[in-house]
Image (spheres, rainbow, N blue to C red):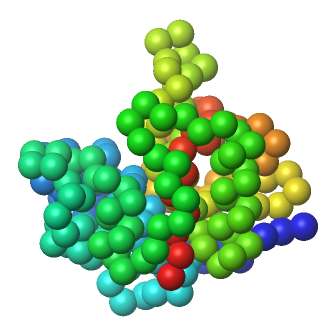
Amino acid sequence: MRAGYPDPTSVLWQGRAPWGSQPVGRGKALFGAVGCVVTSVAQARRILGERAGATPLDVQAAGLARDGVWAPGASGAVVSELVRAQGLDVGVDLDGPGRVAAPDVLRSAVIDCLLHGGVCLGAVDHDSALPSGDSVADHWTCIYAVDDDNVWMTDPATARRERISFETLSGPVSWGRRRRDYRLVRAVTVFR
């Protein structure tokens, strides 16, 4: 069984011109380095059927116009507020500093969201397997479908559709020559 949306024909890359070399939010870090959440929100808008205004720069502009999205000098956004700044609704917000949601809670939130016409912004950890790693989210993606075996997402770092195991909510992803072991740890469900 598959729930969600068809595979997108294109995936936004956070390093693409003209936004890749622009600063994110109110900070100095660039989209190419830390623009994953803004790019994933733009991808979510596209998957939900929007075309006009569905670029990372448009998403950022809407976020900058709303209080509470970015702190002064910060490149990291409050994800739920960034989504609301787009005129979209937030369903379940399993996001927060240092929080890691249990796998059964994440699976339930993702499936429920997709069955009700939404998409899910998923935060993955990709360094917990390393000796110096932790279980804190490192990167944001846009989950658009699940099937019996996989969670399907667009990845703004690889500019590809990626998949992780539905059972373990984890799996390998190639960032060029480097392998990253993704593990879904946080989620924000998004609806039109």
Asked if 23 appears above or below 116 in the picture, the reply is: above
List x then y, in percent, for residue 174. Answer: 59, 41
List x then y, in percent, for residue 21. Answer: 21, 56
Residue 186 placement: quadrant: top right
Residue at image location 74% in from the left, 43% down from the top = 104
Report the number of numbered marks.
Answer: 0
- Taking depth in this image into account, of 109 and 24 the one nearest to the observer is 109
Instruction: State left or right for residue 130 relative to residue 38.
Output: right
Residue at image location 53% in from the left, 26% down from the top = 135
> Which residue lies most toward the top here?
131
List x then y, in percent, for residue 13. Answer: 42, 61
Asked if 94 appears above or below 86 in the picture, the reply is: above
Residue 80 placement: quadrant: bottom left
- Taking depth in this image into account, of 159 and 125 the one nearest to the observer is 125
Q: Is residue 169 visible?
A: no
Instruction: State left or right for residue 167 relative to residue 94.
Output: right
Residue 117 placement: quadrant: bottom right
Asked if 139 appears above or below 181 in the picture, the reply is: below
Locate the N terminus and report the quarter of the image it occupies.
bottom right
Residue at image location 53% in from the left, 76% down from the top = 191
Residue at image location 77% in from the left, 37% down from the top = 168
Asked if 86 appears above or below 146 in the picture, the reply is: below
Q: Is residue 104 visible?
A: yes
> Which residue lies most toward the left here?
72
- Taking depth in this image into account, of 173 and 104 the one nearest to the observer is 104
